[in-house]
Image (spheres, helix red, strand yellow):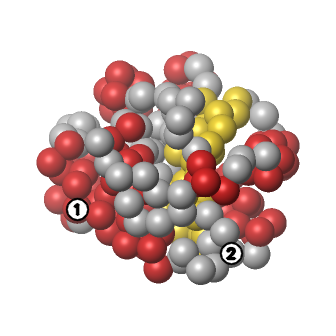
Amino acid sequence: MAVIVVMGVSGSGKSTVGSALAERLGVDYVDGDTFHPPANIAKMSAGTPLTDDDRWSWLDAMADWIGAHAATGGVLGASALKRRYRDRLRAGGDTWFLHLAGDRERLAERLRARSGHFMKVTLLDSQLADLEPLEPDEPGTTVDLADPPARIVDEALAALTDTPEQLRRPSAPS
């Protein structure tokens, strides 16, 4: 079973959809934010976007989690904004991506409604600028984050079932 990475910018619903998907599948769910080192959280809390260098250890820790769940499967919620980040995650094992995509206004509204989270609405534009949608050769699907979580889970499971196993296998990063 592949580890499913629920990806998207902050406010897209990764935690809500990811935990519902994991529950339906009977596998572990983890939020990628738990892998951030304190320095990353401090930067984001201060409204400073992370650099690629800030992200490498975070991505490697998540890839290790993917590898540890290769036999059982699992669901990981992580932004995975760039292709090279997803390649780094895929190096951990059999991985499939569920991209929660939607319009900026809905995302900003969700971020403004949040309380107690380090991610600031001021960082949304930098995340949207960094976002590289899934490419045709990447294992996964894109869904509308405006849909109810239960419908998104149904769509994800249907798309995953239709994905040939060889497309979910790790590929060497380019």
Residue at image position (59%, 80%) is 71
Q: Secondary structure at mark 1?
A: helix
Residue at image position (24%, 51%) is 55
Q: CA distance from mark 1 to mark 2?
A: 25 Å
Quarter location, residue 127: top left
Q: Position of residue 51 (x, y in %)?
A: 18, 41
Q: Are marks 1 and 2 in contact (CB under 8 Å)?
A: no
Query: Is 74 situated left or right of 66 in this image?
Result: right
- What residue type is disc 2 on? Val
The residue lying furthest to the front in this view is 166
Q: Secondary structure at mark 2?
A: loop
Residue bearing mark 1? 57
Q: Position of residue 165 (x, y in %)?
A: 66, 56
Quadrant into which the N terminus falls: bottom right
Quadrant into which the C terminus falls: top left
Residue bearing mark 2? 27
Residue at image position (61%, 70%) is 74
